Amino acid sequence: TDNVYINTKISSLYSNDSFFTNFPSFLELHTTTVKFNDQIKITTNKKFCLFGSRIDKHYGGMQLIKWLKEKNLISQGHISLSRNNEDVDSTNYIRPFIDMDVLNYVKFNIVVAPYFDYTMCDYPMVCEKIFRNIHYSKPFILVGQFDTLAEFKRLGYQTFNELFDESYDTEKDSDTRLQKVFTQIQQLIDKPNDFWQKHKNKLDDIHKHNLDNYENRTSKLQKFYEEIRPR
């Protein structure tokens, strides 16, 4: 069917379809840890992580890097960008690749989604960079299309709106949405360490729910495969 073709070709499904839209895409199923030879030295004094090796042509992603530089926040995070990125010269803090496990050593993750608006993709693209946070039990801020978090929650997952403002997800204007994202990143960087400890139980509940939801969704898919398999 067209639905199956969509899922295998572009990895995600349209929200207004039925039946197959309730199954995980392969981006949701893909959980492999990636390690590179050219890695940063893992330290525990960083607030955030940003995997941005392909954001050179991403408006939201490049505006994010410029904003981090203007606010002198580059040193607050582990940041990965392309080698040929001429707009960034903070080589003391930015590396071409980062071991994914660095997520275990930061407070939150900044996710730059594949698309920032709907000019190239006409539905909210929930990518592997979002699903990755489930398995690393990490809160995240999203630089992407509006309503992407809403789509993530439609799949049964929870986000962190009880701990910080996620209203940026409902903002249709790209520049306004980006400014709201910047505000939240600044506020999370400024949070004292005891903020995360104070809300540890709530964070643990969200992470457990998301992992349980992931396992439930994948088990339903496996059950479906078994039911349609020729006897």
Image (spheres, rainbow, N blue to C red):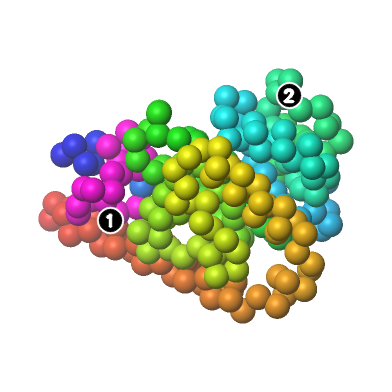
Given the current orientation, which residue lies at the most extreme left position? 231
Q: Which residue is mark 2?
A: 87
- Relative to 94, 148 lies left or right: left
Q: Position of residue 61 (x, y in %)?
A: 61, 35
Instruction: Identify residue type, mark 1.
Output: Asn
Q: Secondary structure at mark 2?
A: loop
**Taking 63 as reference, is 227 above or below it?**
below
**Taking 132 as reference, is 3 above or below it?**
above
Do callouts 1 and 2 mark residues in contact (Cβ within 8 Å)? no
- How crowded pointer 2 is (Cα within 10 Å; few <14, some 14-19, many 20+) is rated as few
- Relative to 218, 110 lies left or right: right
Magenta stretch? 6-24
Q: Position of residue 205 (x, y in %)?
A: 54, 75
Q: Residue 131 colored magenta?
A: no
Q: Residue 7 colored magenta?
A: yes
- How crowded pointer 1 is (Cα within 10 Å; few <14, some 14-19, many 20+) is rated as some
Residue drawn at the location 52% of the way across and 51% of the way down: 168
